[in-house]
Image (cartoon, grey):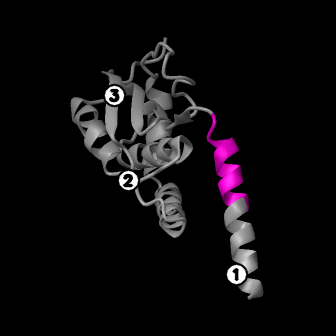
Amino acid sequence: MKLKKVKMLFLSGFLLLGTFACAETARTSADAPETTGETVEAPDVETAQETQEDSTSEVRRNQLDADIRAREERNNLTGGDADRTDGDLQSEVRSKLEANLPASQLAVEAEDGVVTVVGTVPTQEQYERIEPLSREIKGVQDVTVDVTVVPAQPEG
């Protein structure tokens, strides 16, 4: 009985934290746009390489996968299998894109099941994967992609 109370307290705290922590735009890298309305520029080569190394590291991929699984499990426990909060959609789509599109600089916002993705990716192949990857997340009803394909630029 005590374990159930602790479990519910933990889950409630996690939900509350998730609500406030996800109020801002979810970003795939520190250099990604801060909002979906921001103009985006191509990253320099060094920044693109650092972003790619971070997102493709085994530790980071494990973190991203764990984040997606935890949110899916929490959502299934609460009975809202496809009824997702905007913050959950933002976070899960961001995690999915970060894990699968290295060197991307994307910002993700969600409202009422509609996900908007803006930013840059280095290749056309990555661009074409944004919408299908986003739709893999439960609760995503539509995806708006305003992303530019821009290879990393040399500094200077």
Which residues, given as a range, are shown in magenta? Answer: 13-23
Residue 103 visible in this rendered orientation of the protein: no
In the image, residue 21 lies in the stretch drawn in magenta? yes
- From the top left corner, tell me how far across and down residue 36 is, in percent: 48, 22
Please say if the residues under marks 3 and 1 sit with CB atoms less than 8 Å apart: no
SS for dot 1: helix
- From the top left corner, tell me how far across and down residue 27 is, in percent: 53, 35
Q: Which residue is depicted at the point 47% across and 66% down? A: 76
- From the top left corner, tell me how far across and down residue 151 is, in percent: 33, 23
Q: Amino acid at mark 2?
A: Lys
| Real-space Cα separation, disc 3 to disc 1, in angstroms | 40 Å
- From the top left corner, tell me how far across and down residue 141 is, in percent: 33, 41
Q: Amino acid at mark 1?
A: Lys
**Which-is-in-front pick, marks 3 and 1?**
1
Q: Which residue is mark 2?
A: 138
Q: Nearer the viewer, residue 50 or 67?
A: 67
SS for dot 3: strand
Q: Which residue is depicted at the point 65% across and 46% down? A: 19
**Vertical relation: 142 (above or below) 150:** below
Q: Which residue is mark 1?
A: 4
Please state the total of marks drawn on the protein image: 3
Would you call the spot at circle 3 few (<14 residues within 10 Å), some (14-19), or many (20 or more)? some
| Real-space Cα separation, disc 2 to disc 3, in angstroms | 16 Å
| Real-space Cα separation, disc 2 to disc 1, in angstroms | 27 Å
Please say if the residues under marks 2 and 1 sit with CB atoms less than 8 Å apart: no
Q: Which residue is depicted at the point 31% across and 51% down? A: 136
Would you call the spot at circle 1 few (<14 residues within 10 Å), some (14-19), or many (20 or more)? few
Q: Which residue is mark 3?
A: 144
Q: Amino acid at mark 3?
A: Thr
